[in-house]
Image (cartoon, grey):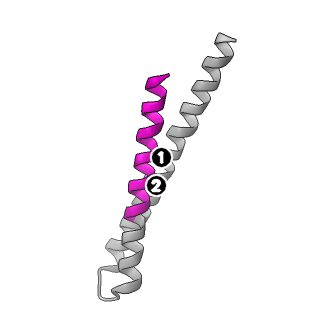
Amino acid sequence: MARMIDIITSAVSGMNMSTARFEAATRRIAEKPESDLAQNLVEAKLASLEFKANVAVVKTANEMWKATLDILA
């Protein structure tokens, strides 16, 4: 059980970091028109993909937890 919590905690931390990266990139796009638009768009897209990957980790951990409970029940 502790291992499952570690996995979820790590994924949530990753989601928080991805959100911060996405916000920083979109803020640069909005506030600094002279900034490299392509680079900021790529960074925002990567942050979005990282967030989705971490959501998938949480979903998989949840499914594994449910399966474990079913086996033990």
Whether residue 41 is situated above or below residue 53 in the rendered picture: below
CB-based contact (under 8 Å), mark 2 and mark 1: yes
* Residue drawn where x is 30% and y is 79% of the image: 36
Whether residue 56 is situated above or below residue 60 in the rendered picture: below
Give SS at disc 2.
helix
The numbered dot on residue 49 is 2
* Residue drawn where x is 54% and y is 31% of the image: 61
Could you say which quadrant of the image residue 66 lies in? top right
- 6 relative position to 67: left or right: left
Could you say which quadrant of the image residue 47 lies in? bottom left
Q: Which residue is mark 1?
A: 53
Q: Is residue 51 magenta?
A: no
Label 1 environment density (alpha carbons within 10 Å; few <14, some 14–19, many ≥20): some
Q: Amino acid at mark 1?
A: Ala
Position of the C terminus by quadrant: top right
| Magenta residues (range) | 1-21
- The percent coordinates of residue 26 (x first, y second) are 42, 74
Could you say which quadrant of the image residue 33 lies in? bottom left
Seen from the viewer's position, the closer of residues 7 and 46 is 7
- The percent coordinates of residue 20 (x first, y second) are 39, 62
* Residue drawn where x is 44% and y is 60% of the image: 19
Q: Amino acid at mark 2?
A: Leu
Seen from the viewer's position, the closer of residues 26 and 41 is 26
- The percent coordinates of residue 14 (x first, y second) are 40, 48
Point out the residue furthest to the bottom here: 34
Label 2 environment density (alpha carbons within 10 Å; few <14, some 14–19, many ≥20): few
Q: CA distance from mark 2 to mark 1?
A: 6 Å
* Residue drawn where x is 61% and y is 30% of the image: 63
